[in-house]
Amino acid sequence: MRRRFSRFLSGVKSEAVQRGLSPSAADAVLSGASVSQSVLNRDRAQGVFKQTFLEFSQRTGSTSRLNTGKRKIQQYASTFDRARREFGVPAGVLTAFWAMETDFGAVQGDFNTRNALVTLSYDCRRPHIFRPQLLALIEMTQHGDFNPATETGAWAGELGQVQMLPEDIIRYGVDGDGDGHVRVKKSSPDALLTAANFIRSLGWRSGEPWIQEVIIPKDLPWDKTGFGGGLTAGQWFKLGVQPRDGNTRFSNLPTALLMPQGRFGPTFLAYPNFNVYLEWNQSFIYTTSVAYFATRFEGAAAYNKGNPERGLSDSQMKQLQTALSRKGSRRRQDRRHSRRRYPRCGPLGSDAARHAGRRLANSAIAAGSALTSNERQRKGRFGYPKRPFLWKYDQLAVSLCPRQKRLRHPRSGGQERPP
């Protein structure tokens, strides 16, 4: 295994040099690198997120954290003004991500980032996802923006105060403090403006809302709720849905009526900008919570908790998942496809497995590049099948409505993330 690992490191260095990176930067990252069993354990763990929206949003969006965020907005007023002016991203949106991901930079992860990405690139399961991140880390090191020996982050390679991947930092990095570097771990201006640039790249529409709390009547066309319902905000308003803040200026925008704990709990209209949150993190509870928290920083009142019905039990949810699998859901088909294309592998796998993963990645990337940017935008969350009344488990919500998004690893980072 040691000999195979050495060949792997040599291959990464050769590829980095072919891309124009310096051999010394590659050596700085790869020399002393090792496989982390703790990273492998985390990657193979199948965590289940069981908190409800009310539980998670109240824990992560506490009054104390809200007050801290407001002070941060004042402290970095010029940075937030620049983010809005250059990238169209409001202060509340950035502050909510900053809070949720790392508690304003206080908890950024304790996994050595270099070893994490080396481990996941060497492992047989998803090298096509992590190897480009390792190469980007070498480029960050060459720029003087990263210290491979000491800097830490999430187990899956995300780093910095808003937990971003090295490729995204290279592509969207902004020197916010004017020191000639993009150091998203130590510099709050660098981290915030880099995040703003990245959010814009995901399709953020300046000047438009992302989520809005509403009051709903007793009777509605329930089959139109959730993603894919096809109604504009104005059509919902005509059906008796009332925005709590009274703002009806965006009646022409397409929306999704979201009830994360059923129709007796908090209810929201999600606008096209909400799709950006789902690109950031696929967890429905996380995205709804951070989007709601962003509105609080922008002046919205606390939501009406309502009186939600009790969700399904563990056994009931498993029964429902089993029944859906028997119906032949796309998720089941995707699992069969993955088993067919990926060979079985041991803890660190075979070269054949890595090559198979790379071939699959190349074909997927080639297929994605054939789409225009407008076509990619149209294939956002609002074009997918709606979610039924699911409010207990994120895992089931994702399995019913799988994403067809660009190849990216599962987000893993900040302390407030679902496990």
Image: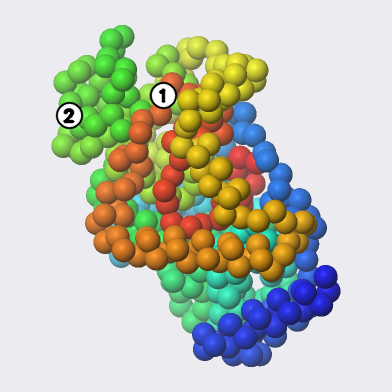
Q: How many marks?
A: 2
Check the picture and name the quadrant holding the C terminus.
top right
Q: Residue at x 46, y 77 (%)?
A: 178
Residue 235's image quarter? top left
Disc 2 and disc 1 in contact, CB within 8 angstroms: no
- SS at circle 2: helix
In front here: 88 or 30?
30
Is residue 82 something one can see in this rendering? Answer: no
Q: Residue furthest right?
A: 2
Residue 316 image-quadrant placement:
top right
Q: Colour mode?
A: rainbow
User: Which residue is nearer to you in this view: 401 or 21?
Assistant: 401
Asked if residue 57 is positioned above or below residue 412 in the image, the reply reads: above
Q: Earlier in the sequence, mark 2 or mark 1?
A: 2
* Residue at the image position 47 percent from the left and 32 percent from the top: 329
* Disc ID at residue 399: none
Task: Using residue 330 as the reference point, say whether residue 128 is left or right of it.
Answer: right
Report the mark closest to the observer, 2 or 1. Answer: 1
Residue kind at label 1, given as amino acid type: Pro
Q: Which percent across, then down, holds residue 408?
A: 51, 57
Give coordinates of residue 122: x percent, y percent: 69, 67
Category of crowding for the residue at label 1, using alpha-carbon neighbours closer than 10 angstroms: few (below 14), some (14–19), many (at least 20): some
The residue identified by callout 2 is 234
**Type of the residue with mark 2:** Gly
Residue at 54% x, 21% y is 323
205 and 374: which one is in front?
374
| Residue pointed to by mark 1 | 388
The image quadrant where one finds the N terminus is bottom right
Q: Position of residue 214 (x, y in %)?
A: 32, 24
**What element does badge 1 sit on?**
loop
* Above-or-below relation of 367 to 28: above
